[in-house]
Image (cartoon, helix red, strand yellow):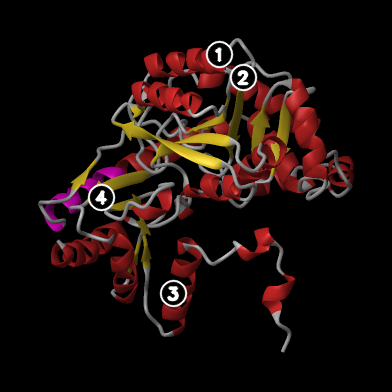
Amino acid sequence: MVDADKFYSELGKTFEPGIITQVVLAAMDSAKQGKKIIGLTGGMYDPPSLPGEEVSRVLAEASEEDWREMLQYGGTVGSLELREELSKFMAGHGIEADPNGEIIVTTGSQQALDLVARVFLDPGDVVIVGAPTYLSALGAFRQFNPEIRSVEIDEGGMNVEALEAELGRIEAEGKWAKLLYLVPSFQNPTSTMLTVERRKRIVELAEEHDFIILEDNPYGYICFEGEMPTPVMGLDEGGRTMYTSTFSKIVSPGMRIGWLVAPREFISKMVEAKSNVSICNDGITQYVAAQLFKRGEVERQIPKVTEVYRRKRDLMLEAMKTSFPVEAEWNDPEGGLFLWVKLPEHVNTTEILMEAVENGVAFIPGSNFFAEPVHNYIRLNYSFPSEADIVEGIQILGGLLKKAV
């Protein structure tokens, strides 16, 4: 047998199965044994709401010339037609971006996170994130060994007073914060909304302390009450913000359409970085995405799926009231895909996970969303499971949590 360990790079040695991989494998094992696993885990799309008919219609109506273009190599930066449609879409939400030079199409927004980390981070660079924050952003950043510092997320999003204090500590240590990572609209995992006042103050702090901002907005369009505030990028006149979003939450995760908006010089660097791992995006999905924008299907799909998620959120909240222990605390999200649950400090939700899977329900332990060890939180997803599975899954999980508390 080959001694595999001696061949791995230092980076390669860090790639161990994460919690989501473990949950998926456990669910697959259970399925082989004929057991059902209710997944309250990832932010997957509601299956009946996927726009299958609309996508089929677009492809059926494509011309021979369209097909020749779809099936050929494309540019690394992405389809111009799609970039033009993305520019129009974002203009309706407060972001002005030139499709010729300020937008790059990515394979989902996860590739955008990887590109930013790849182009901007060196070992030891200081990156500021929320506590908690999106777990796969932490994974993308950690590849390049930065120093990750955390700032409290409260009911109004990232606490700007805590951010300012952390910036002061960093500078007192003789260091420089290079990058701030934000999920301002229905943050993952807490579903909090960063207030307009805080958005403006963060832009001011970026100027005062000379850092750049990566704004990640997969969830902001799924808004149950009113409209999403202007993104941070729309408030930034100094060119310090990069913005990424995705089709995955508003149209289809399987199409793997994401995009990144940034100043022209940043985009040129990231296009070259992208070319080393992905010569071009899939031509068929880019064509379909552009056509869905042109036909108004994207604007129709967002309110449609939002209403489905509002109903599922309400159902999950109602089930939690009757099934969860009284010691548990949770939010009432006004949008997005997740509920964030806090349990007493002695409860380790990672230890509960495998027992939960054995009993037919899966969730994501909160420890995965913190840069430092925190073990008494749970993230629950209501977008993917059916309404019946939401009720059953919450009842099963509630019984396990009552025992743990």
Q: Which residue is tagged 4?
A: 316
Residue in view at x 74 percent, y 72 percent: 7
Callout 1 amino acid: Glu
**Which is more N-terminal, label 1 or label 2?**
1
Asked if the residue under mark 1 is in contact with the one under mark 2, i.e. CB atoms within 8 Å, the reply is yes
| Magenta span: chief secondary structure | helix
Residue 93 visible in the displayed image: no
Q: Is residue 319 magenta-colored?
A: yes
For marks 1 and 4, the one nearer the N-term is 1
Give the Cα distance between marks 4 and 3. 24 Å
Mark toward the start of the polypeptide (3 vs 2): 3
Of 327 and 185, nearer the camera is 327
- Residue corresponding to mark 1: 207
Looking at the image, is mark 4 or mark 3 nearer the viewer?
Answer: 3
Q: Which residue does the numbered mark 2 point to in the structure image?
A: 240
Q: Which secondary structure, mark 4?
A: helix
Q: Secondary structure at mark 3?
A: helix
Spatial CA distance of label 3 from label 2 is 43 Å
User: Is 313 on the left-hand or right-hand side of 243?
Assistant: left
- Say whether residue 362 is magenta: no
Q: What's under tag 4, amino acid-wise?
A: Met
Residue 55 vertical position relative to residue 83 in the rendered view, above or below: below
CB-based contact (under 8 Å), mark 4 and mark 3? no
Q: Which residue carries the number 3 mark? A: 26
Could you say where residue 176 lies in the image, as x and y percent from the top left? 56, 27
Sequence-first disc among 3 and 1: 3
176 relative position to 192: left or right: right
Between the C-alphas of marks 3 and 1, the distance is 47 Å
